[in-house]
Image: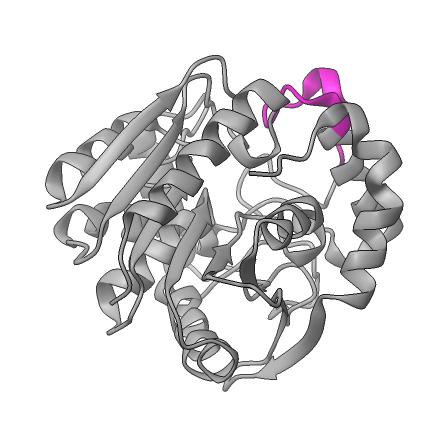
């Protein structure tokens, strides 16, 4: 397998950018709520399609390195920016506000993307790759919609979140009350517009190279920037978190858990794993939240398990 490395990443940027420009087809998909931005790339010898469900504030632009790497390993890749982020439609006047009416809206969009764009361009084996919020969306989609996926690999999935200094029961109650009194489109306490943290302050990754490239892309493309969450998003997320343990996946599941995660709660990942018929959880030592953007030693271990998982599942 080909693995991209931190050491060569800066000098490879021209190749990655050229690939992103020339090989990745990028368009908008009309949905009842708005236009979703998506991209796909299919190598000539493709044997499996990977459908990426990205995390909060993420999108197609951030995943350039991974898409390029998967393509070089003969995987077809499909990815759509979730509503309210990336280059997809944003429902609020302030585009920095993270908002969704109900969490299942994300899965509804994914279902449209799957049944139209992906179905049109790929009929073979498919594996879902979801990160963080995108992992929760992937799980929601796969448990609520008929589909023909062979397996799902979740990186640090959002089955629960840390509420930092606020006790979780209080955070849930405040979000619920705020929505009840009409503040669903207001920033939650302590949240605001996009403001990049320094690498030293970041809680996402220990790879300075990948972190700086991520922030550089967002600096160059202000339209993809996203700030904090609204009470509406928070309330919708808490409702999903409450209901998730009642759902069962009909396909194999692999959960990659980050040992040092301070964004999502790893205990919830363990609980979900125990409730599934065919699930594996593996914790990656010394890893922060963004396993797919971590330093090489961690990222390579995660992707090695991902490739092994893809090989182990069979076409439906």
Total marks shown come to 0
Work out whether 44 lies above or below 264. below
**x 65%, y 49%: residue:** 63
Q: Nearer the viewer, residue 213 or 103?
A: 213
Q: Nearer the viewer, residue 7 or 204?
A: 7
**x 61%, y 33%: residue:** 293
Asked whether residue 264 appears in the rendered view, the answer is yes
To which quarter of the image does residue 90 belong?
bottom right
Asked whether residue 157 appears in the rendered view, the answer is no
**Magenta span contains residue 201:** yes
- Image quadrant occupied by the C terminus: bottom left
To which quarter of the image does residue 161 belong?
top left
Picture coordinates of residue 132 (x, y %)? 45, 42
**First to last magenta residue range:** 196-209
**Magenta span contains residue 122:** no
**x 79%, y 36%: residue:** 213
Q: Please identify the dominant SS of the magenta region.
A: loop
Picture coordinates of residue 263 (x, y %)? 47, 30
Picture coordinates of residue 59 (x, y %)? 63, 55
Q: Nearer the viewer, residue 152 or 219?
A: 152
To which quarter of the image does residue 104 belong?
bottom left
- Image quadrant occupied by the N terminus: top right
Q: Is residue 267 left or right of residue 100?
A: left
Q: Nearer the viewer, residue 41 or 101?
A: 41
**x 49%, y 13%: residue:** 286
Colouring scheme, one of rainbow, by chain, secondary structure, one colour: one colour
């Amino acid at each position: 397998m080909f693995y991209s490395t931190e050491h060569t990443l800066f000098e490879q940027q021209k190749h990655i950018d050229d690939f992103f420009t020339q090989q990745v087809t990028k368009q908008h998909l009309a949905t009842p709520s708005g236009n979703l931005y998506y991209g796909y790339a299919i190598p000539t010898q493709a044997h499996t399609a990977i459908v990426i469900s990205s995390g909060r504030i993420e999108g197609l632009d951030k995943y350039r390195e991974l898409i390029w790497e998967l393509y070089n390993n003969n995987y077809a890749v499909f990815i759509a920016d979730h509503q309210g982020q990336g280059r997809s439609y944003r429902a609020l006047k302030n585009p920095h506000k993270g908002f969704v009416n109900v969490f299942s809206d994300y899965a509804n969009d994914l279902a449209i993307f799957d049944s139209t764009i992906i179905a049109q361009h790929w009929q073979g084996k498919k594996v879902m790759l979801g990160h963080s919020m995108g992992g929760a969306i992937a799980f929601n989609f796969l448990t609520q919609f008929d589909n023909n996926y062979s397996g799902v690999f979740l990186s640090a999935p959002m089955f629960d979140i840390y509420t930092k200094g606020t006790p979780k029961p209080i955070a849930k109650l405040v979000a619920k009350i705020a929505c009840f009194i009409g503040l669903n489109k207001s920033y939650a306490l302590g949240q605001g517009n996009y403001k990049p943290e320094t690498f030293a302050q970041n809680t996402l990754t220990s790879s300075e190279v990948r972190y700086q490239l991520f922030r550089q892309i967002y600096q160059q493309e202000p339209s993809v920037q996203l700030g904090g969450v609204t009470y509406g998003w928070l309330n919708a997320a808490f409702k999903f978190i409450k209901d998730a343990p009642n759902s069962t996946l009909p396909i194999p599941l692999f959960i990659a858990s980050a040992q040092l995660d301070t964004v999502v709660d790893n205990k919830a990942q363990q609980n979900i794993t125990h409730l599934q018929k065919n699930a594996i959880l593996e914790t990656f030592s010394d890893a922060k939240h963004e396993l797919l953007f971590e330093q090489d030693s961690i990222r390579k271990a995660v992707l090695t398990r991902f490739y092994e998982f893809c090989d182990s599942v069979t076409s439906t």
